Amino acid sequence: MAMRPAPDPHKDAYALILDAIDQGIYRPGDRLVESELADRFGVSRTPIREALQRLETQSLLTRDGRSLIVASLDHAQMAELYAVRQELEGLAARLAAQHAAIEEIEVLRGMVEADHALLGDPQALARANRRFHHQIHLASHNRFLVQQLDLVYRSMALMARTSLAAQGRGQKALAEHAEIVEAIAARDGARAAQALKDHLSIAFVVRLKEEAQKVEG
């Protein structure tokens, strides 16, 4: 019988579980079991237990009896999250227009161009979308803003389905990304902030339509 590899004490159990939720391996409502997580990630149960407690404290996990399950966002929570995202990411875009280095802008342009190859693969496009937005956060050159946006994006992992899976949304989203980048390149902070806010507003509308269709079904 093949021997199971010894747990790796250097692995970050919290990051591993959070990434699995973010990738949709564990979805809202899924139960998380210490022993199963330890086997999956090759980590001992003690750091897994500590990671689960931390995720519960951050409201990313919730109790269902004695079990911990991945939390979900209700309509009000989703609206609140998008409201915060619009303001914080709009500020990030405004600051990026002021502070981004030419090289950072070229990286953003390259991301938009490369992401066209991912059209038709919503999950891959969603991961690229997060990288693009994070690059704008970094280009703001404001560490406190980046920290707050990191917290917001943890909660984004609780959305079971990416809005980029909607018909035609991927192509339109990339066009919106291009507009944001060009506003940053033009050093037009107001235009960049508005373009990013509009981008998130459209994404929110797509999610609301999807939720409405679930109710109708």
Image (spheres, grey):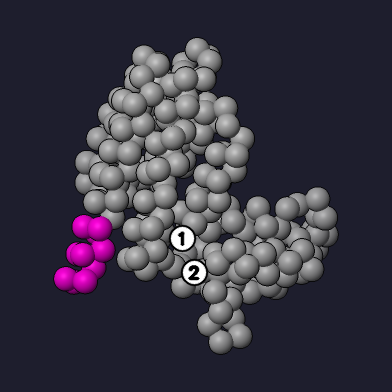
User: Measured from the top left, where is residue 110 in percent x and y?
Assistant: 44, 20
The 10 Å Cα crowd at callout 1, few under 14, some 14 to 19, many 20 or more, is: many
Residue drawn at x 53%, y 58% is 21
User: Measured from the top left, where is residue 208 in percent x and y?
Assistant: 25, 58
User: In this figure, which residue is indicated by the disc labeled 2?
Assistant: 71
Answer whether labels 1 and 2 touch (C-beta < 8 Å). Answer: yes
> Does residue 191 belong to the magenta stretch?
no
User: Measured from the top left, where is residue 96 in percent x and y?
Assistant: 47, 25
> Does residue 213 belong to the magenta stretch?
yes
Residue drawn at x 68%, y 69% is 53
Q: Amino acid at mark 1?
A: Leu
User: In this figure, which residue is indicated by the disc labeled 1?
Assistant: 158
Corner quadrant of residue 170: top left
Precedes in sequence: disc 1 or disc 2 = 2
Position of residue 159 relative to residue 184, above or below, is: below
Q: Is disc 2 placed on a helix, strand or loop? A: loop
Corner quadrant of residue 177: top left
Residue drawn at x 22%, y 41% is 168
Residue drawn at x 30%, y 31% is 195
Please state which of residues 27 and 144 is positioned toward the viewer in this rendering: 144
Question: For the magenta stretch, what is the residue range?
Answer: 208-217
Q: Amino acid at mark 2?
A: Ala
User: Measured from the top left, where is residue 173 in percent x and y?
Assistant: 30, 36
**Magenta highlight: main SS:** helix
Q: CA distance from mark 1 to mark 2?
A: 7 Å
Q: Is disc 1 placed on a helix, strand or loop? A: loop
| Left or right of residue 212: residue 145 | right
Image quarter of the N terminus: bottom right
